[in-house]
Each structure stands twice: as C-alpha cells, then as structure tokens.
Amino acid sequence: MTERTLVIVKPDGVERGLVGEVVKRIESKGYRLVTVDLLTPDRATLERHYAEHEGKPFFRPLVEFMSSGPVFAMVVEGDRVIAGFRSLAGATDPTVAAPGTIRGDLGREWDAPVMRNLVHGSDSEASAAREIAIWFPSL
C-alpha cells in the first residue's frame, strides 16, 4: 500500500551534518523523496505541527528547539512508508534505540524536556496528511 509521510531531520541532525545519512537510509529502504526543503521553521508552523501537545510541559521547549536552526523537511513515498520510516528511526529516546536505527546509531542526546533525537516521522496516515499540508501546502 503506497503512502506518503512527513520526515524532518531536526536542527541537531542538520547541525551534525546527518541529512545525507538519513536520506541514504530512506532511499536504501526503497522509498522515494517526493519533495524536500531546507528551512528554519517559524513558530506558527511549529505550533500548528505540534498542536496536539499544546499545554504539555515540553511544548514550548520543543517549539524553541525546532525553531533554533534549519531543518530538512521531506515528503517520502512508498509501500507502508509510515511504519517503515518509524522503524528506521528507532525508539524516541536515542539511549535505548536499537542499533541499526537512525537514533540508535547516530543519536546522542536526550535532553528532557526537549527531544534532540535527530528525526521526526508522522505516526499515522491522518497525521501524515495533516503534517504534509502544514509543511508542503501545494501538494
């Protein structure tokens, strides 16, 4: 079943020069990049993206972190890509993410309450559709 998902290399991944490695892993899995953008997101975009977390203690620090530098946002397409990318990414906490995953191999920090964990991937078809519309409204 072909799907699309939003993948973001977060500011920590861009700063560490890991965009190419993340893209390589995505493409090696057989997924296709539909569109990409390197940008520093504004707070309004991030507040819409993370709207379900508004009011939680980590919401403001997460928005601050995500707006602290450039991110590499991409729409990725492929068979069951939502679950597939989440598997490639690994557990949210890089400390316990399995070897062979992006976070397990490349992640270094868990700085509560901010998740400096390199990548974001949509968690469902509904989230993917909503997030893609926020980041790439022309699609």
Image (cartoon, grey):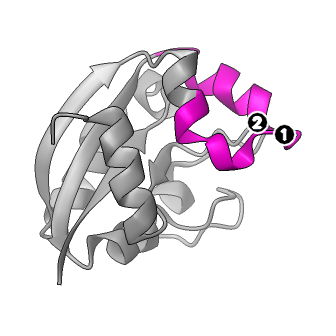
Residue contact at pointers 1 and 2, CB within 8 angstroms: yes
Q: Position of residue 7 (x, y in %)?
A: 36, 49
Eyeballing the image, is 51 above or below 105? above
The majority secondary structure of the magenta stretch comes to: helix
Q: Position of residue 85 (x, y in %)?
A: 36, 66
Nearer-the-camera pick, 60 or 88? 60
Amino acid type at circle 2 is Phe
Q: Which residue is mark 2?
A: 59
State yes or no: residue 65 in magenta: yes
Q: Which residue is mark 1?
A: 55
Magenta region: which residues? 47-69
For discs 1 and 2, the disc positioned in front in the rendered view? 1
Residue at image position (47%, 46%) is 119
Q: Position of residue 14 (x, y in %)?
A: 41, 27
Q: Residues within 10 Å of mark 1 (few under 14, many from 20)?
A: few
Q: Tell me the element at label 1.
A: loop
Q: Which mark is residue 79?
A: none
Can residue 88 be seen here?
Answer: no
